[in-house]
Image (cartoon, rainbow, N blue to C red):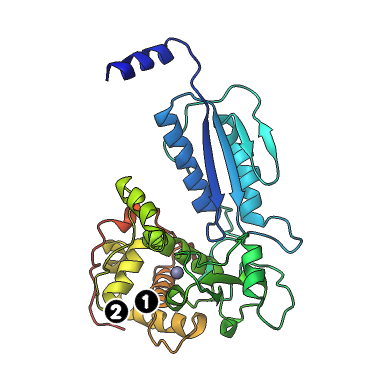
Amino acid sequence: MGNRRKLKAKTAAGAPPKGIAIYHDMKVYENFERAAKRIFECVQAAQRNKPGAPRFLYLDIQGHRNEQGGFDHDAFELMQDFLLGFLGSYLSEISTPLFRVGMPGPQRNDLPDVLEIGYPDDGSDYGYEVSQLDLKPREREPADRKSPPTVRAIADYLGLDDPGCLICWRTPVERAHVVPASLGGSMDVRNFALLCKEHHAEAPDVADAESFWAWVDYAELRDSADKWLEAPDDLKEWLVGNGVKVGIGRRESTSFFSAVRRELKSLYGWGESDLRAVDWQDLMDEFHQVMEMATGKHFSIEKKISTHAWAYHVALQRCTGKGGRSMPISSLGEDLRGIGGLDGPDGVD
Ligand SMILES: [Zn+2]
């Protein structure tokens, strides 16, 4: 204790604080909003833990490529507009796959409390068009292929040495369509994810690519502790000893509709008021239309929690007319705690 006090006093007396490295890997399933929010929170934490220390940001990017092999819109916007244009003044140096720059001028340390992201007024090229229920792929000009790419080709696109499930890292993996072929999804490598059999069977079959990826992001947060299940015993022991959760343990079994409600709450941010605000019969009418037009049925699984949750979410947007566009909100972890049931009629389907 005495030692720590002395060290603190010395630092305060003038020795410059050591630099702090911040690393973020923008995953293929992260969009601009989620990546920007997470990087911002890391920089906030760095300022909290080591106030004023020079901050060095390292960004890696998985997938997120355009037709020419360059970075897609979200990745480019993250590097150019968010890092260089906004966050740069709160950093000393930025390294990305496109550039490495030392920031001119002294690093600012007066970080805002909240990150606010503005969107184009006309909503162009952003979110899912809920009034149309159209196909919304991530790739704008898909490669003209008649057969799916190999597992190896998808792994190469994602920068994986060994193909593993994007959510739990397990093998073997399956090639999962982002937007199903039955809904018009392409054979482009960018329309594929690698998932284990279990996660493939759980993933949504919907017309909106970003909602598929948002679900993968959500499932990764929910199940990431499973990544360590097949680690060597001594590593597992060390992880547990250091406070890392290994394995998600027993999942409580709930009814289908409770599971859908849980996902609406944790993935789409539904609250009690959202359900009270709408006429239940109207919602069900819209729900069936969305299911019919913009979802697919796979694996002979008649009822899929993730597909149903998405369809309820889009149906609610259609009922309330909220802007006409839907943006999946993947929870950043806090919503995963304290999951409870939402109010609403039971047994409706
Ligand atoms: Zn998996």
Is residue 118 visible in the rendered image? The answer is no
* 87 with respect to 104 (left or right): left
Q: Amino acid at mark 2?
A: Phe
Say what secondary structure mark 2 lies in: helix
Between residue 198 and residue 124, name the one nearer to us. Answer: 198
- Cβ atoms under marks 2 and 1 closer than 8 Å: yes
* 246 with respect to 158 (left or right): left
Instruction: Say which mark, if any, is on residue 305.
Output: 1
Task: Name above or below for residue 121 compared with residue 305.
Answer: above
Q: Residues within 10 Å of mark 1 (few under 14, many from 20)?
A: many
For the point 53% across and 42% down, which residue is it? 23
* 262 with respect to 128 (left or right): left
* 68 with respect to 324 (left or right): right
Is residue 325 visible in the rendered image? The answer is yes
Q: Residue furthest top?
A: 13
Q: Earlier in the sequence, mark 2 or mark 1?
A: 2
For the point 46% across and 75% down, which residue is it? 204
Between residue 61 and residue 312, name the one nearer to us. Answer: 61
Q: Position of residue 311 (x, y in %)?
A: 42, 76
Q: Residue furthest bottom?
A: 300
Q: Residue furthest right?
A: 68
Q: Which residue is mark 2?
A: 256
Quadrant of the rendered image holding ligand 1: bottom left
> What is the C-alpha distance between the residues marked 2 and 1?
7 Å
Q: Position of residue 221 (x, y in %)?
A: 40, 58
For the point 40% across and 74% down, which residue is it? 306
Between residue 176 and residue 267, name the one nearer to us. Answer: 176
Q: Position of residue 22 (x, y in %)?
A: 52, 38
